[in-house]
Image (cartoon, coloured by chain):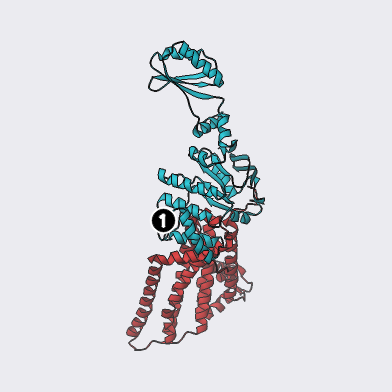
Chain colours: A red, B cyan
Amino acid sequence: MNFNNPVLFKELKLRFRSFKGFNGILFFLLAMCIFVFGYIFLTVNISGTSYFRPSQSFVLFAFLSYIQLGLVLFTAPGLTAGSISSEREKQTLPILLTTSQSSFQIISGKMLSSVAFLLLLIVAGLPVYSLVFLFGGISPWSFVKVFFFLFVTLLAIGSIGVMFSTLIRRTIVSMIVTYGTMLFLSVVTGFLFIIVIQMKAFNQMGTVITTPSYLGQFLASINPAVLFATFLSPDMGYGISELTKVDFPIWAGYLIFYGLLTVGALFIAVKRLRVNMKRLK
Amino acid sequence: MIEIKGLTKKYGQFTALDNLNLTLNEGTVFGFVGANGAGKSTTFLIISTLLQPTSGEVFINGVSVREKPSEIRKLIGYMPDFFGVYDQLKAEEYLDFYGASYGIPEEERKKLIPQLLELVNLSHKRDSYVDLLSRGMKQRLCLARSLIHDPKVLILDEPASGLDPRARVEMRDILKTLKGMGKTILISSHILPELAEMCDEIGVIDNGKLIAHGSVAEIQKKLQGEKVITVRLLDRVDETIAFFEEQPYVSSIEKLDGGDGISFMYRGTEEEQLGMLKEAMLADMPIVSFMEHVTNLEDVFMEITKGAEA
Protein backbone atom coordinates (compact mmCIF):
# COMPACT_ATOMS: atom_id res chain seq x y z
CA MET A 1 0.00 0.00 0.00
CA ASN A 2 1.17 3.51 -0.78
CA PHE A 3 0.98 5.45 2.44
CA ASN A 4 1.70 8.71 0.69
CA ASN A 5 -1.85 8.67 -0.55
CA PRO A 6 -3.43 12.13 -1.05
CA VAL A 7 -6.96 10.73 -1.37
CA LEU A 8 -6.60 8.82 1.91
CA PHE A 9 -5.32 11.87 3.82
CA LYS A 10 -7.98 14.14 2.32
CA GLU A 11 -10.77 11.68 3.13
CA LEU A 12 -9.60 11.22 6.71
CA LYS A 13 -9.30 14.97 7.17
CA LEU A 14 -12.80 15.59 5.85
CA ARG A 15 -14.31 12.73 7.83
CA PHE A 16 -13.08 14.10 11.14
CA ARG A 17 -13.72 17.73 10.30
CA SER A 18 -17.44 17.17 10.73
CA PHE A 19 -19.17 16.06 13.93
CA LYS A 20 -20.59 13.04 12.12
CA GLY A 21 -17.42 11.01 12.68
CA PHE A 22 -17.21 11.81 16.40
CA ASN A 23 -20.92 11.27 16.91
CA GLY A 24 -20.66 7.85 15.30
CA ILE A 25 -17.94 6.77 17.73
CA LEU A 26 -19.74 8.32 20.71
CA PHE A 27 -23.04 6.56 20.08
CA PHE A 28 -21.39 3.25 19.26
CA LEU A 29 -19.39 3.29 22.52
CA LEU A 30 -22.43 4.38 24.50
CA ALA A 31 -24.43 1.47 23.08
CA MET A 32 -21.60 -0.96 23.85
CA CYS A 33 -21.26 0.33 27.45
CA ILE A 34 -25.00 0.16 28.09
CA PHE A 35 -25.08 -3.38 26.76
CA VAL A 36 -22.01 -4.70 28.64
CA PHE A 37 -22.66 -3.01 31.98
CA GLY A 38 -26.37 -3.70 31.70
CA TYR A 39 -25.69 -7.38 31.11
CA ILE A 40 -23.26 -7.64 34.05
CA PHE A 41 -25.63 -5.71 36.33
CA LEU A 42 -28.64 -7.80 35.41
CA THR A 43 -26.77 -11.12 35.62
CA VAL A 44 -25.37 -10.36 39.04
CA ASN A 45 -28.72 -9.10 40.34
CA ILE A 46 -30.94 -11.79 38.84
CA SER A 47 -28.69 -14.67 39.92
CA GLY A 48 -28.55 -13.17 43.38
CA THR A 49 -24.84 -13.81 43.56
CA SER A 50 -22.30 -11.11 43.85
CA TYR A 51 -20.05 -12.59 41.20
CA PHE A 52 -19.95 -13.06 37.46
CA ARG A 53 -19.32 -16.61 36.25
CA PRO A 54 -16.85 -17.35 33.40
CA SER A 55 -19.62 -19.06 31.42
CA GLN A 56 -21.65 -15.86 31.59
CA SER A 57 -18.58 -13.98 30.48
CA PHE A 58 -18.47 -16.23 27.43
CA VAL A 59 -22.09 -15.41 26.54
CA LEU A 60 -21.21 -11.74 26.76
CA PHE A 61 -18.19 -12.31 24.50
CA ALA A 62 -20.38 -14.14 21.97
CA PHE A 63 -22.94 -11.33 21.96
CA LEU A 64 -20.28 -8.66 21.58
CA SER A 65 -18.65 -10.56 18.73
CA TYR A 66 -21.93 -10.73 16.85
CA ILE A 67 -22.59 -7.05 17.55
CA GLN A 68 -19.18 -6.22 16.05
CA LEU A 69 -19.92 -8.45 13.08
CA GLY A 70 -23.27 -6.73 12.59
CA LEU A 71 -21.52 -3.38 12.82
CA VAL A 72 -19.08 -4.38 10.09
CA LEU A 73 -21.74 -5.93 7.84
CA PHE A 74 -24.15 -3.02 8.06
CA THR A 75 -21.74 -0.09 8.24
CA ALA A 76 -19.11 -1.08 5.65
CA PRO A 77 -21.53 -0.89 2.66
CA GLY A 78 -22.76 2.51 3.83
CA LEU A 79 -19.22 3.83 4.10
CA THR A 80 -17.85 2.45 0.85
CA ALA A 81 -20.74 2.12 -1.63
CA GLY A 82 -20.72 5.87 -2.32
CA SER A 83 -16.97 6.38 -2.36
CA ILE A 84 -16.56 6.80 -6.13
CA SER A 85 -20.17 7.36 -7.24
CA SER A 86 -20.56 10.32 -4.86
CA GLU A 87 -17.47 11.91 -6.45
CA ARG A 88 -19.15 11.35 -9.80
CA GLU A 89 -22.40 12.90 -8.55
CA LYS A 90 -20.59 15.88 -7.05
CA GLN A 91 -18.70 16.32 -10.35
CA THR A 92 -15.31 16.09 -8.66
CA LEU A 93 -14.34 12.78 -10.29
CA PRO A 94 -13.24 14.05 -13.75
CA ILE A 95 -10.75 16.42 -12.13
CA LEU A 96 -9.46 13.68 -9.84
CA LEU A 97 -9.02 11.34 -12.80
CA THR A 98 -6.91 13.85 -14.72
CA THR A 99 -4.34 14.01 -11.92
CA SER A 100 -1.19 11.89 -11.92
CA GLN A 101 -2.53 9.58 -9.22
CA SER A 102 -2.81 5.98 -10.34
CA SER A 103 -6.21 4.30 -10.30
CA PHE A 104 -4.91 2.00 -7.55
CA GLN A 105 -3.94 4.98 -5.40
CA ILE A 106 -7.40 6.51 -5.74
CA ILE A 107 -9.27 3.26 -5.07
CA SER A 108 -7.00 2.24 -2.17
CA GLY A 109 -7.27 5.74 -0.68
CA LYS A 110 -11.07 5.61 -0.81
CA MET A 111 -11.15 2.07 0.54
CA LEU A 112 -8.64 2.58 3.35
CA SER A 113 -10.27 5.77 4.59
CA SER A 114 -13.58 3.94 5.04
CA VAL A 115 -11.93 0.85 6.50
CA ALA A 116 -9.84 3.00 8.83
CA PHE A 117 -12.95 4.64 10.25
CA LEU A 118 -14.65 1.33 10.87
CA LEU A 119 -11.45 -0.05 12.34
CA LEU A 120 -11.34 2.94 14.64
CA LEU A 121 -14.86 2.11 15.81
CA ILE A 122 -13.83 -1.46 16.54
CA VAL A 123 -10.58 -0.45 18.25
CA ALA A 124 -12.37 2.25 20.26
CA GLY A 125 -14.69 -0.50 21.52
CA LEU A 126 -11.79 -2.71 22.62
CA PRO A 127 -11.60 -1.46 26.23
CA VAL A 128 -15.28 -2.26 26.68
CA TYR A 129 -14.86 -5.55 24.85
CA SER A 130 -11.88 -6.51 26.99
CA LEU A 131 -14.03 -6.39 30.12
CA VAL A 132 -14.85 -10.01 29.36
CA PHE A 133 -11.25 -10.90 30.24
CA LEU A 134 -11.75 -9.60 33.76
CA PHE A 135 -14.04 -12.50 34.55
CA GLY A 136 -12.16 -15.25 32.68
CA GLY A 137 -13.60 -17.91 30.39
CA ILE A 138 -12.23 -16.41 27.18
CA SER A 139 -8.85 -17.21 25.69
CA PRO A 140 -6.91 -14.36 24.12
CA TRP A 141 -6.56 -16.55 21.03
CA SER A 142 -10.36 -16.59 20.53
CA PHE A 143 -10.28 -12.85 20.86
CA VAL A 144 -7.52 -12.46 18.23
CA LYS A 145 -9.28 -14.88 15.84
CA VAL A 146 -12.55 -12.97 16.06
CA PHE A 147 -10.80 -9.67 15.41
CA PHE A 148 -8.73 -10.97 12.53
CA PHE A 149 -11.79 -12.35 10.76
CA LEU A 150 -13.75 -9.19 11.48
CA PHE A 151 -10.99 -7.36 9.64
CA VAL A 152 -11.09 -9.84 6.73
CA THR A 153 -14.89 -9.38 6.49
CA LEU A 154 -14.52 -5.62 6.69
CA LEU A 155 -12.00 -5.59 3.82
CA ALA A 156 -14.18 -7.84 1.66
CA ILE A 157 -17.45 -5.95 2.18
CA GLY A 158 -15.58 -2.65 1.78
CA SER A 159 -14.03 -3.81 -1.50
CA ILE A 160 -17.42 -4.91 -2.80
CA GLY A 161 -18.81 -1.48 -1.91
CA VAL A 162 -15.97 0.33 -3.68
CA MET A 163 -16.35 -1.94 -6.72
CA PHE A 164 -20.08 -1.28 -7.10
CA SER A 165 -19.49 2.40 -6.47
CA THR A 166 -17.06 2.42 -9.40
CA LEU A 167 -19.27 0.38 -11.71
CA ILE A 168 -22.62 2.01 -10.90
CA ARG A 169 -23.16 5.70 -11.58
CA ARG A 170 -25.67 6.43 -8.81
CA THR A 171 -24.83 6.10 -5.12
CA ILE A 172 -28.29 4.97 -4.09
CA VAL A 173 -28.24 2.08 -6.60
CA SER A 174 -24.69 1.18 -5.59
CA MET A 175 -25.78 1.10 -1.91
CA ILE A 176 -28.74 -1.15 -2.67
CA VAL A 177 -26.60 -3.58 -4.67
CA THR A 178 -23.88 -3.66 -1.99
CA TYR A 179 -26.37 -4.23 0.84
CA GLY A 180 -28.02 -6.90 -1.32
CA THR A 181 -24.68 -8.67 -1.79
CA MET A 182 -23.93 -8.41 1.93
CA LEU A 183 -27.35 -9.88 2.81
CA PHE A 184 -26.81 -12.67 0.30
CA LEU A 185 -23.44 -13.55 1.82
CA SER A 186 -24.54 -13.33 5.43
CA VAL A 187 -28.15 -14.55 5.35
CA VAL A 188 -29.06 -16.25 2.07
CA THR A 189 -26.00 -18.52 2.10
CA GLY A 190 -27.09 -19.72 5.58
CA PHE A 191 -30.54 -20.68 4.28
CA LEU A 192 -29.06 -22.29 1.18
CA PHE A 193 -26.71 -24.31 3.40
CA ILE A 194 -29.64 -25.65 5.43
CA ILE A 195 -31.60 -26.45 2.24
CA VAL A 196 -28.63 -28.24 0.62
CA ILE A 197 -28.00 -30.36 3.73
CA GLN A 198 -31.70 -31.15 4.15
CA MET A 199 -32.04 -32.17 0.50
CA LYS A 200 -29.00 -34.40 0.78
CA ALA A 201 -30.40 -36.04 3.90
CA PHE A 202 -33.79 -36.46 2.18
CA ASN A 203 -32.28 -38.04 -0.95
CA GLN A 204 -30.29 -40.53 1.06
CA MET A 205 -33.01 -41.22 3.60
CA GLY A 206 -32.51 -44.45 5.46
CA THR A 207 -28.89 -44.79 4.45
CA VAL A 208 -25.73 -43.49 6.06
CA ILE A 209 -24.60 -40.34 4.32
CA THR A 210 -21.10 -40.89 3.03
CA THR A 211 -20.80 -38.76 -0.12
CA PRO A 212 -19.37 -35.30 0.54
CA SER A 213 -21.42 -32.14 -0.09
CA TYR A 214 -18.92 -29.62 -1.41
CA LEU A 215 -21.64 -27.09 -2.11
CA GLY A 216 -22.87 -27.34 1.48
CA GLN A 217 -19.34 -26.92 2.80
CA PHE A 218 -18.79 -23.95 0.47
CA LEU A 219 -22.01 -22.24 1.57
CA ALA A 220 -21.11 -22.75 5.24
CA SER A 221 -17.59 -21.47 4.61
CA ILE A 222 -18.69 -18.16 3.13
CA ASN A 223 -21.25 -17.31 5.79
CA PRO A 224 -19.80 -14.93 8.42
CA ALA A 225 -22.38 -15.95 11.05
CA VAL A 226 -21.46 -19.64 10.66
CA LEU A 227 -17.75 -18.81 10.87
CA PHE A 228 -18.23 -16.87 14.10
CA ALA A 229 -20.36 -19.69 15.48
CA THR A 230 -17.49 -22.13 14.86
CA PHE A 231 -15.14 -19.80 16.75
CA LEU A 232 -17.49 -19.46 19.69
CA SER A 233 -18.35 -23.14 19.71
CA PRO A 234 -15.71 -25.40 18.10
CA ASP A 235 -18.21 -28.30 18.24
CA MET A 236 -20.21 -26.45 15.61
CA GLY A 237 -17.26 -26.74 13.19
CA TYR A 238 -17.09 -30.51 13.73
CA GLY A 239 -20.85 -30.72 13.35
CA ILE A 240 -20.74 -29.02 9.96
CA SER A 241 -17.95 -31.35 8.82
CA GLU A 242 -20.09 -34.28 9.91
CA LEU A 243 -23.03 -32.97 7.91
CA THR A 244 -21.11 -32.18 4.74
CA LYS A 245 -18.57 -35.01 5.00
CA VAL A 246 -15.89 -32.52 3.93
CA ASP A 247 -12.90 -32.25 6.21
CA PHE A 248 -11.80 -28.71 5.45
CA PRO A 249 -11.73 -26.01 8.11
CA ILE A 250 -14.47 -23.41 7.76
CA TRP A 251 -12.07 -20.59 8.62
CA ALA A 252 -9.68 -21.59 5.79
CA GLY A 253 -12.50 -21.64 3.23
CA TYR A 254 -13.67 -18.28 4.54
CA LEU A 255 -10.19 -16.78 4.33
CA ILE A 256 -9.64 -18.02 0.76
CA PHE A 257 -13.08 -16.94 -0.48
CA TYR A 258 -13.08 -13.48 1.08
CA GLY A 259 -9.40 -12.97 0.22
CA LEU A 260 -10.13 -13.69 -3.44
CA LEU A 261 -13.29 -11.58 -3.29
CA THR A 262 -11.34 -8.62 -1.91
CA VAL A 263 -8.59 -8.88 -4.52
CA GLY A 264 -11.10 -9.45 -7.35
CA ALA A 265 -13.36 -6.55 -6.34
CA LEU A 266 -10.43 -4.15 -5.96
CA PHE A 267 -8.96 -5.30 -9.27
CA ILE A 268 -12.24 -4.63 -11.09
CA ALA A 269 -12.60 -1.23 -9.38
CA VAL A 270 -9.05 -0.21 -10.34
CA LYS A 271 -9.51 -1.41 -13.94
CA ARG A 272 -12.88 0.28 -14.41
CA LEU A 273 -12.17 3.59 -12.68
CA ARG A 274 -10.66 5.16 -15.77
CA VAL A 275 -11.55 4.54 -19.40
CA ASN A 276 -9.22 2.33 -21.36
CA MET A 277 -7.83 4.78 -23.89
CA LYS A 278 -6.04 2.05 -25.83
CA ARG A 279 -9.26 0.28 -26.69
CA LEU A 280 -11.24 2.12 -29.35
CA LYS A 281 -14.93 2.41 -28.62
CA MET B 1 2.57 20.64 -29.93
CA ILE B 2 -1.00 19.32 -30.31
CA GLU B 3 -1.91 17.14 -33.24
CA ILE B 4 -5.41 15.77 -33.67
CA LYS B 5 -5.78 13.22 -36.46
CA GLY B 6 -9.12 11.93 -37.70
CA LEU B 7 -10.68 12.06 -34.25
CA THR B 8 -14.14 10.52 -34.24
CA LYS B 9 -16.53 9.74 -31.42
CA LYS B 10 -19.80 7.93 -31.97
CA TYR B 11 -22.54 7.06 -29.49
CA GLY B 12 -24.43 4.36 -31.33
CA GLN B 13 -25.77 6.00 -34.49
CA PHE B 14 -25.05 9.52 -33.24
CA THR B 15 -21.74 11.03 -34.29
CA ALA B 16 -20.58 13.51 -31.67
CA LEU B 17 -17.24 14.14 -33.34
CA ASP B 18 -16.60 13.52 -37.02
CA ASN B 19 -13.06 13.11 -38.32
CA LEU B 20 -11.55 16.11 -36.54
CA ASN B 21 -8.12 17.16 -37.77
CA LEU B 22 -6.23 19.98 -36.13
CA THR B 23 -2.63 21.01 -35.51
CA LEU B 24 -1.68 23.63 -32.96
CA ASN B 25 1.78 25.02 -32.31
CA GLU B 26 3.29 25.57 -28.88
CA GLY B 27 2.09 28.76 -27.20
CA THR B 28 -1.02 29.01 -29.35
CA VAL B 29 -4.26 30.12 -27.75
CA PHE B 30 -6.95 28.24 -29.59
CA GLY B 31 -10.60 29.18 -29.23
CA PHE B 32 -13.11 26.46 -29.85
CA VAL B 33 -16.44 27.89 -30.93
CA GLY B 34 -19.64 25.98 -31.32
CA ALA B 35 -23.19 25.62 -30.14
CA ASN B 36 -24.16 23.27 -27.30
CA GLY B 37 -23.63 19.67 -28.36
CA ALA B 38 -21.40 20.66 -31.29
CA GLY B 39 -18.52 18.48 -30.05
CA LYS B 40 -16.29 20.89 -28.12
CA SER B 41 -16.52 19.15 -24.75
CA THR B 42 -16.21 15.73 -26.40
CA THR B 43 -12.93 16.81 -27.98
CA PHE B 44 -11.67 18.17 -24.67
CA LEU B 45 -12.70 15.01 -22.80
CA ILE B 46 -10.77 12.83 -25.24
CA ILE B 47 -7.67 15.03 -25.03
CA SER B 48 -7.94 14.92 -21.21
CA THR B 49 -7.97 11.09 -21.25
CA LEU B 50 -11.51 10.96 -19.86
CA LEU B 51 -13.26 9.57 -22.93
CA GLN B 52 -12.38 6.84 -25.42
CA PRO B 53 -12.44 7.93 -29.06
CA THR B 54 -14.14 5.72 -31.62
CA SER B 55 -11.22 6.27 -33.95
CA GLY B 56 -8.40 8.72 -34.51
CA GLU B 57 -5.48 9.92 -32.45
CA VAL B 58 -4.34 12.89 -30.41
CA PHE B 59 -0.69 13.67 -29.77
CA ILE B 60 0.61 16.23 -27.30
CA ASN B 61 4.34 16.89 -27.62
CA GLY B 62 4.50 13.70 -29.67
CA VAL B 63 2.94 11.63 -26.85
CA SER B 64 -0.14 9.65 -27.82
CA VAL B 65 -3.23 10.20 -25.67
CA ARG B 66 -4.34 6.64 -26.36
CA GLU B 67 -1.00 4.95 -25.79
CA LYS B 68 0.32 6.91 -22.81
CA PRO B 69 -2.59 8.58 -20.99
CA SER B 70 -0.64 8.80 -17.72
CA GLU B 71 2.08 10.82 -19.50
CA ILE B 72 -0.56 13.08 -21.01
CA ARG B 73 -2.05 13.83 -17.59
CA LYS B 74 1.25 15.38 -16.54
CA LEU B 75 1.25 17.59 -19.63
CA ILE B 76 -2.28 18.97 -19.36
CA GLY B 77 -4.29 21.04 -16.93
CA TYR B 78 -8.00 20.41 -17.41
CA MET B 79 -10.86 22.56 -16.26
CA PRO B 80 -14.29 21.06 -17.05
CA ASP B 81 -17.38 23.11 -17.89
CA PHE B 82 -19.18 21.82 -14.79
CA PHE B 83 -17.27 20.80 -11.73
CA GLY B 84 -17.87 20.35 -8.03
CA VAL B 85 -15.73 21.05 -5.01
CA TYR B 86 -15.24 19.15 -1.78
CA ASP B 87 -17.20 20.34 1.23
CA GLN B 88 -15.29 21.45 4.29
CA LEU B 89 -11.99 21.88 2.48
CA LYS B 90 -10.25 25.24 2.58
CA ALA B 91 -8.96 26.90 -0.61
CA GLU B 92 -5.35 26.32 0.42
CA GLU B 93 -6.05 22.68 1.32
CA TYR B 94 -7.89 22.21 -1.99
CA LEU B 95 -4.79 23.22 -3.93
CA ASP B 96 -2.57 21.24 -1.57
CA PHE B 97 -4.60 18.09 -2.21
CA TYR B 98 -4.27 18.42 -5.97
CA GLY B 99 -0.60 19.35 -5.65
CA ALA B 100 -0.04 16.12 -3.71
CA SER B 101 -2.10 14.29 -6.35
CA TYR B 102 0.45 15.38 -8.94
CA GLY B 103 3.28 14.19 -6.71
CA ILE B 104 4.59 17.67 -5.90
CA PRO B 105 6.68 17.54 -2.67
CA GLU B 106 5.16 19.24 0.37
CA GLU B 107 7.90 21.88 0.63
CA GLU B 108 7.38 22.87 -2.99
CA ARG B 109 3.62 23.00 -2.54
CA LYS B 110 3.98 25.40 0.37
CA LYS B 111 5.80 27.86 -1.89
CA LEU B 112 3.62 27.27 -4.94
CA ILE B 113 0.15 27.61 -3.43
CA PRO B 114 0.45 31.27 -2.31
CA GLN B 115 1.77 32.17 -5.78
CA LEU B 116 -1.16 30.47 -7.49
CA LEU B 117 -3.68 32.08 -5.16
CA GLU B 118 -2.04 35.41 -5.94
CA LEU B 119 -2.29 34.74 -9.69
CA VAL B 120 -6.04 34.17 -9.49
CA ASN B 121 -6.61 36.96 -6.96
CA LEU B 122 -7.69 34.67 -4.16
CA SER B 123 -4.93 35.23 -1.61
CA HIS B 124 -7.46 36.72 0.80
CA LYS B 125 -9.59 33.55 0.56
CA ARG B 126 -6.88 31.01 1.37
CA ASP B 127 -8.57 29.96 4.63
CA SER B 128 -12.11 30.06 3.27
CA TYR B 129 -14.04 26.87 2.70
CA VAL B 130 -14.19 26.14 -1.01
CA ASP B 131 -17.90 25.31 -1.06
CA LEU B 132 -18.68 28.75 0.36
CA LEU B 133 -16.85 30.67 -2.38
CA SER B 134 -18.77 32.46 -5.13
CA ARG B 135 -19.05 30.85 -8.55
CA GLY B 136 -16.44 33.19 -10.03
CA MET B 137 -14.04 32.44 -7.19
CA LYS B 138 -14.56 28.71 -7.61
CA GLN B 139 -13.80 29.05 -11.33
CA ARG B 140 -10.61 30.94 -10.57
CA LEU B 141 -9.61 28.45 -7.91
CA CYS B 142 -10.21 25.61 -10.35
CA LEU B 143 -8.02 27.40 -12.85
CA ALA B 144 -5.29 27.70 -10.21
CA ARG B 145 -5.76 24.00 -9.52
CA SER B 146 -5.25 23.16 -13.19
CA LEU B 147 -1.97 25.09 -13.10
CA ILE B 148 -0.52 23.49 -9.98
CA HIS B 149 1.76 21.06 -11.83
CA ASP B 150 2.84 23.69 -14.35
CA PRO B 151 1.28 21.97 -17.38
CA LYS B 152 2.33 22.85 -20.92
CA VAL B 153 -1.25 22.67 -22.16
CA LEU B 154 -4.37 24.12 -20.57
CA ILE B 155 -7.74 22.76 -21.58
CA LEU B 156 -10.47 25.11 -20.43
CA ASP B 157 -14.03 24.11 -21.19
CA GLU B 158 -16.31 27.14 -20.94
CA PRO B 159 -14.30 28.81 -18.18
CA ALA B 160 -16.45 31.94 -18.25
CA SER B 161 -19.87 30.30 -18.29
CA GLY B 162 -22.21 31.37 -15.54
CA LEU B 163 -20.01 34.25 -14.46
CA ASP B 164 -21.18 37.81 -13.95
CA PRO B 165 -19.57 40.53 -16.14
CA ARG B 166 -16.98 41.45 -13.51
CA ALA B 167 -15.97 37.82 -12.99
CA ARG B 168 -15.70 37.40 -16.78
CA VAL B 169 -13.33 40.32 -17.02
CA GLU B 170 -11.25 38.92 -14.15
CA MET B 171 -11.12 35.50 -15.81
CA ARG B 172 -10.12 37.07 -19.14
CA ASP B 173 -7.29 38.99 -17.47
CA ILE B 174 -5.97 35.82 -15.87
CA LEU B 175 -6.06 34.03 -19.22
CA LYS B 176 -4.15 36.89 -20.81
CA THR B 177 -1.49 36.48 -18.10
CA LEU B 178 -1.30 32.75 -18.85
CA LYS B 179 -0.98 33.48 -22.55
CA GLY B 180 1.92 35.74 -21.65
CA MET B 181 3.49 32.81 -19.78
CA GLY B 182 3.64 30.88 -23.07
CA LYS B 183 1.07 28.21 -22.22
CA THR B 184 -0.71 26.46 -25.04
CA ILE B 185 -4.37 27.04 -24.26
CA LEU B 186 -7.44 25.37 -25.68
CA ILE B 187 -10.50 27.27 -24.63
CA SER B 188 -14.13 26.93 -25.54
CA SER B 189 -16.75 29.56 -25.06
CA HIS B 190 -20.14 30.75 -26.21
CA ILE B 191 -19.02 34.32 -25.72
CA LEU B 192 -17.30 34.72 -29.04
CA PRO B 193 -16.10 38.34 -28.84
CA GLU B 194 -14.24 37.37 -25.66
CA LEU B 195 -12.38 34.65 -27.52
CA ALA B 196 -11.55 36.98 -30.40
CA GLU B 197 -9.68 39.23 -28.04
CA MET B 198 -7.33 36.64 -26.66
CA CYS B 199 -7.14 33.82 -29.22
CA ASP B 200 -4.49 33.36 -31.90
CA GLU B 201 -6.63 30.84 -33.72
CA ILE B 202 -10.30 29.98 -33.79
CA GLY B 203 -11.97 26.72 -34.73
CA VAL B 204 -15.67 26.62 -35.46
CA ILE B 205 -17.27 23.25 -34.80
CA ASP B 206 -20.78 22.28 -35.73
CA ASN B 207 -22.44 18.86 -35.54
CA GLY B 208 -19.09 17.30 -34.71
CA LYS B 209 -17.33 18.76 -37.75
CA LEU B 210 -14.68 21.44 -37.78
CA ILE B 211 -16.13 23.75 -40.38
CA ALA B 212 -13.70 26.62 -40.11
CA HIS B 213 -10.22 27.04 -38.68
CA GLY B 214 -7.80 29.93 -38.82
CA SER B 215 -6.99 33.27 -37.27
CA VAL B 216 -9.86 35.49 -36.20
CA ALA B 217 -9.14 37.80 -39.16
CA GLU B 218 -9.10 34.89 -41.62
CA ILE B 219 -12.44 33.62 -40.45
CA GLN B 220 -13.98 37.08 -40.56
CA LYS B 221 -12.63 37.50 -44.09
CA LYS B 222 -14.55 34.43 -45.15
CA LEU B 223 -17.75 36.40 -44.72
CA GLN B 224 -16.54 39.59 -46.30
CA GLY B 225 -18.03 38.53 -49.69
CA GLU B 226 -21.48 39.28 -48.30
CA LYS B 227 -22.33 42.10 -45.99
CA VAL B 228 -25.37 43.66 -44.40
CA ILE B 229 -26.12 47.32 -45.17
CA THR B 230 -28.58 49.36 -43.16
CA VAL B 231 -30.04 52.52 -44.69
CA ARG B 232 -31.97 54.99 -42.50
CA LEU B 233 -34.49 57.16 -44.33
CA LEU B 234 -36.33 60.36 -43.64
CA ASP B 235 -39.45 59.14 -45.53
CA ARG B 236 -40.51 57.42 -48.81
CA VAL B 237 -39.44 53.99 -47.59
CA ASP B 238 -41.35 52.02 -50.27
CA GLU B 239 -39.89 54.16 -53.05
CA THR B 240 -36.38 53.56 -51.71
CA ILE B 241 -37.02 49.81 -51.50
CA ALA B 242 -38.07 49.86 -55.14
CA PHE B 243 -34.86 51.73 -56.04
CA PHE B 244 -32.55 49.23 -54.28
CA GLU B 245 -34.45 46.24 -55.66
CA GLU B 246 -33.32 47.31 -59.12
CA GLN B 247 -29.65 47.50 -58.07
CA PRO B 248 -27.31 44.59 -58.85
CA TYR B 249 -25.84 42.45 -55.98
CA VAL B 250 -28.66 43.49 -53.62
CA SER B 251 -30.83 40.86 -51.97
CA SER B 252 -33.02 40.21 -48.92
CA ILE B 253 -34.32 43.77 -48.54
CA GLU B 254 -36.23 44.23 -45.28
CA LYS B 255 -37.85 47.19 -43.57
CA LEU B 256 -36.31 48.09 -40.20
CA ASP B 257 -38.46 47.49 -37.11
CA GLY B 258 -39.08 51.18 -36.55
CA GLY B 259 -40.16 51.61 -40.21
CA ASP B 260 -37.60 54.41 -40.66
CA GLY B 261 -35.24 52.53 -42.93
CA ILE B 262 -34.26 49.34 -44.68
CA SER B 263 -31.52 46.69 -44.54
CA PHE B 264 -30.27 44.42 -47.30
CA MET B 265 -27.51 41.97 -48.18
CA TYR B 266 -24.89 43.25 -50.62
CA ARG B 267 -22.36 41.18 -52.59
CA GLY B 268 -20.65 43.82 -54.74
CA THR B 269 -17.16 45.29 -54.44
CA GLU B 270 -16.46 48.49 -52.53
CA GLU B 271 -16.27 50.47 -55.84
CA GLU B 272 -19.66 49.11 -56.91
CA GLN B 273 -21.02 49.93 -53.48
CA LEU B 274 -19.79 53.53 -53.86
CA GLY B 275 -21.39 53.74 -57.32
CA MET B 276 -24.71 52.51 -55.96
CA LEU B 277 -24.64 55.09 -53.16
CA LYS B 278 -23.85 57.92 -55.64
CA GLU B 279 -26.74 56.82 -57.84
CA ALA B 280 -29.10 56.79 -54.86
CA MET B 281 -28.09 60.36 -53.98
CA LEU B 282 -28.57 61.48 -57.61
CA ALA B 283 -32.03 59.84 -57.59
CA ASP B 284 -32.80 62.05 -54.57
CA MET B 285 -33.43 59.18 -52.18
CA PRO B 286 -34.09 60.57 -48.63
CA ILE B 287 -31.05 58.79 -47.10
CA VAL B 288 -30.08 59.94 -43.58
CA SER B 289 -27.42 57.27 -43.03
CA PHE B 290 -25.88 54.43 -45.05
CA MET B 291 -24.20 51.95 -42.73
CA GLU B 292 -22.27 48.77 -43.35
CA HIS B 293 -22.49 46.31 -40.46
CA VAL B 294 -19.24 45.37 -38.85
CA THR B 295 -19.35 41.58 -38.84
CA ASN B 296 -18.51 40.35 -35.36
CA LEU B 297 -17.67 36.80 -34.41
CA GLU B 298 -21.25 36.09 -33.42
CA ASP B 299 -22.33 36.88 -36.98
CA VAL B 300 -19.45 34.84 -38.35
CA PHE B 301 -20.47 31.90 -36.23
CA MET B 302 -24.13 32.19 -37.12
CA GLU B 303 -23.34 32.47 -40.82
CA ILE B 304 -20.85 29.61 -40.89
CA THR B 305 -23.05 27.22 -38.96
CA LYS B 306 -26.08 28.20 -41.07
CA GLY B 307 -24.13 27.17 -44.15
CA ALA B 308 -23.08 23.91 -42.55
CA GLU B 309 -26.64 23.01 -41.62
CA ALA B 310 -27.81 23.64 -45.17
Relative side of B278 to B19, left or right: left
Residue reaching furthest to the bottom? A50
- At horizontal 50% and vertical 63% (from top left) the residue drawn is B111
The quadrant in which residue A51 appears is bottom left
Asked whether A160 or B164 is in front, the reply is: B164
User: Residue A279 placed where, x, y %?
Assistant: 65, 51
Q: How many marks?
A: 1
The quadrant in which residue A3 appears is bottom right
Residue A180 makes an appearance in the image: no
Q: Dot 1 surroundings within 10 Å: few (below 14), some, or many (20 or more)?
A: some
Residue type indicated by callout 1: Asp
Q: Is residue B112 above or below residue A249?
A: above
User: Residue B260 placed where, x, y %?
Assistant: 39, 19
Q: Is residue B73 above or below residue B164?
A: below
Asked whether A26 or B158 is in front, the reply is: B158
- At horizontal 49% and vertical 80% (from top left) the residue drawn is A143
Relative side of B167 to A235, left or right: left
- At horizontal 38% and vertical 16% (from top left) the residue drawn is B234
Q: Is residue B259 above or below residue A21?
A: above
Query: The C terminus of chain B lies in which quarter of the figure?
Result: top right
Asked whether B112 or A230 is in front, the reply is: B112
- At horizontal 44% and vertical 65% (from top left) the residue drawn is A15
Which residue lies under the disc numbered 1?
B131
Name the secondary structure under disc 1: helix
